[in-house]
Image (cartoon, rainbow, N blue to C red):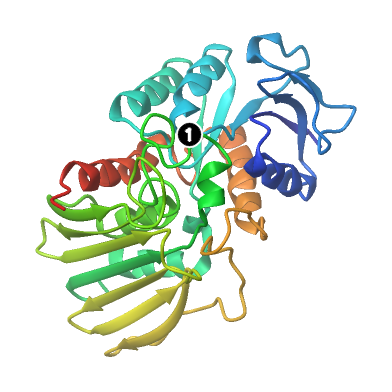
Amino acid sequence: MDIFKFVVIGSGNISRTYFNAIGNIDEAEIVGVISRSGRKTESVGDDVEVKSRLEDITVDYDAVIITTPNGLHHSWAVTAAGLGKHVLTEKPLDITVEAMDAMISACRQNDVKLGVAYQRRTSPDNMIVKELLEQNVLGKVFAADMQIKCYRKQEYYDSSSYRGGYAIDGGGPFIQQASHNIDIYGWFFGKPVKTVSMLGTFLHKIEGEDHGIAILKHADGMIGSIEASTCTSPGFPPVLTIHSEKGTCVLENDIITFWNMDGVANPSISTGLKIHDGATSAAVADGGGHERIIIDFIEAVKQNRPPVVSGDEARLATEIVLDIYKNNVY
């Protein structure tokens, strides 16, 4: 069996999630780590090469996994693509249109894959609802309301100077905690044609917002709403409520918890499934979604097909967030 070899860029909390996930995948291995200091951390084994620059890695590898802060994703992706290495990056793709375009262009020009870890797309009930929407089984959808009510203490933002700022994080919870859920919103319903938002900073000393809501109008007439927060103690699982001409369905943390659709049986296959919701902590307790993303990414490279979430597809989530920020009337 050929072992697919990764270099992880970044040595923060999320990098440990990838170490744990790849430890459960027989056909994958981490052979290198990029850290600013160039020194090993406790979680990095003696057989893993650690450098401060990707160009200095001497071991052979197939792809990188980018786990740096949001606004640094593009520079590492462009460097990796220039070295002929495939790129899997943490969400979001990046925080500006220009940065995302640079990533997508570099990977395309160097004929390498670009995947993004929006693992909520691999949740079974999300996949089922997506298919039902594509097939118009639920009829015309006129409303979709998404709530991502997380809670973070000030210590979370104080842990790194970039947290909650625009230059590197890209903003507050809309670009950070809610990014996964906004990816699902865009995947289900597409890009809105008009956005109006009200965003504020209430409980934290940060540059960006810590609570807000956006109203989104779509080309087919659907009106959606997205509420995102890191103020709502103690933190609640994310909820998406969909209202259509046939009825209502509710997904709580990517699992169908309410279903009342005329003539359509509840299709949920996720009873008992546990998925990390991010409501109270940034630490990922369940890495199953990351494992599915990594396995698919490896298969995408070997089969020469797009990953389950390509750079082109992941671009939409950031575009929706940027429109929310641009159209803040608070």
| Image coords of residue 72 (percent x, y) | 48, 26
Describe the element under mark 1 as helix, strand or loop.
loop
Q: Is residue 267 visible?
A: no
Q: Mark 1 sits on what residue?
A: 162
- Residue at left offset 66%, top offset 55%: 287
Q: Amino acid at mark 1?
A: Tyr
**Residue 302 placement, left or right of 33:** left
202 sits to left or right of 17: left
Judged left or right of residue 190, residue 318 is right
Mark 1, Cα crowd under 10 Å, few <14 / some 14-19 / many 20+, is some
Q: Is residue 175 above or below residue 275?
A: above
Q: Nearer the viewer, residue 92 or 315?
A: 92
- Using the rendered view, name the quadrant where residue 140 is placed: bottom left
Which one is nearer the viewer's eye here, 57 or 225?
225
Nearer-the-camera pick, 136 or 222: 222
Residue sitting at x 22%, y 84%: 246
Residue found at x 37% / y 37%:
170
Q: Position of residue 236 (x, y in %)?
A: 47, 71
Where does residue 243 sit, x and y in percent of width and height?
23, 78
Give 146 or 269, whichever is nearer the viewer.
146
User: On the rendered structure, is 182 left or right of 11?
Assistant: left
